Image (spheres, rainbow, N blue to C red):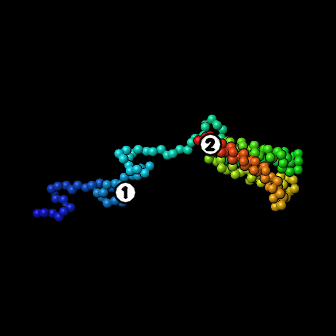
């Protein structure tokens, strides 16, 4: 007596292939190979782990600031320059033109490389904040015309501070690779 194909005889135990582990494949299919991290097919050492690419670490002995700390340093330098100018003059002049670029230099040198972008775009915004504060202190009110005039006359200060920050940031990017 012959049995239909695929059925086991009672004298012989049925052999069963292990099911593929949760891949949605029917029993009897081999499991799919896992892809290699670099695009090649997995070889015999499939249990090998590959570390994630790490960013270059900062020098542990070097003082670094977070992005917020560097922006605070820049704002304090601008506010100190504005305070000196308001004590000895009528508007934002020499002290602000000197201290804001010094603050941009210090902030861009001390900030972490991951937050360098925020320090590079901050000098015009810090100058705008310092100008608004000085106008509120001296006149007691803000007007659009006074802000516009202050921004026009303060353009060299903003440009110098931005250029110093970009130069230091570029120097850091080149030298610390």
168 or 139: which is nearer to us?
168
| SS class, disc 1 | loop
Residue bearing mark 1 = 22
Q: Position of residue 57 (x, y in %)?
A: 58, 41
Count every numbered label the image shows and give the total: 2
Q: Is residue 83 visible?
A: no
Q: Furthest residue to the top?
A: 61
As drawn, the residue found furthest toward the left would be 1
Query: Horizontally, is 35 left or right of 107 in the view?
Result: left
Q: In the shown orientation, is residue 13 left or right of residue 126?
A: left
Locate residue 43 relative to residue 56 in the image: left or right.
left
Residue drawn at (34%, 54%) of the image: 31
Q: Nearer the viewer, residue 133 or 108?
A: 108
Task: Pinpoint residue 137: horizontal percent, then vertical percent.
Answer: 85, 53
The residue shown at (75%, 45%) is 101
Image coordinates of residue 63 in percent, x first then y, are 66, 38
Residue 3 visible to the viewer? yes
Of residues 26 and 9, the one nearer the viewer is 26
Quick check: 65 above or below 130? above
Q: Nearer the viewer, residue 18 or 60?
A: 60
Q: Residue at x 87, y 46 (%)?
A: 87
The residue drawn where x is 79% and y is 44% is 98
Q: Residue 54: x, y in percent? A: 53, 44
Return the residue at label 2. Answer: 174
């Amino acid at each position: 007596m012959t049995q239909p194909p695929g059925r086991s005889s009672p004298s012989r135990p049925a052999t069963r292939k292990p099911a593929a582990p949760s891949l949605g494949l029917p029993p009897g299919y081999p499991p799919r190979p896992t892809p290699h991290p670099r695009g090649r097919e997995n070889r015999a050492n499939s249990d090998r782990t590959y570390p994630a690419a790490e960013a270059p670490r900062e020098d542990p002995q070097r003082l670094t600031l977070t992005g917020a700390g560097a922006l605070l340093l820049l704002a304090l330098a601008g506010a100190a320059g504005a305070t000196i100018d308001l004590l000895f003059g009528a508007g934002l002049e020499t002290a602000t033109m000197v201290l804001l670029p010094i603050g941009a230099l210090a902030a861009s040198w001390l900030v972490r490389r991951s937050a360098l972008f925020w320090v590079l775009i901050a000098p015009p915004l810090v100058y705008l904040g310092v100008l608004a504060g000085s106008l509120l202190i001296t006149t007691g009110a803000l007007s659009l015309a006074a802000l516009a005039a202050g921004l026009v006359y303060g353009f060299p200060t903003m440009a110098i501070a931005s250029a110093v920050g970009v130069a230091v940031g570029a120097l850091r990017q080149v030298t610390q690779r």
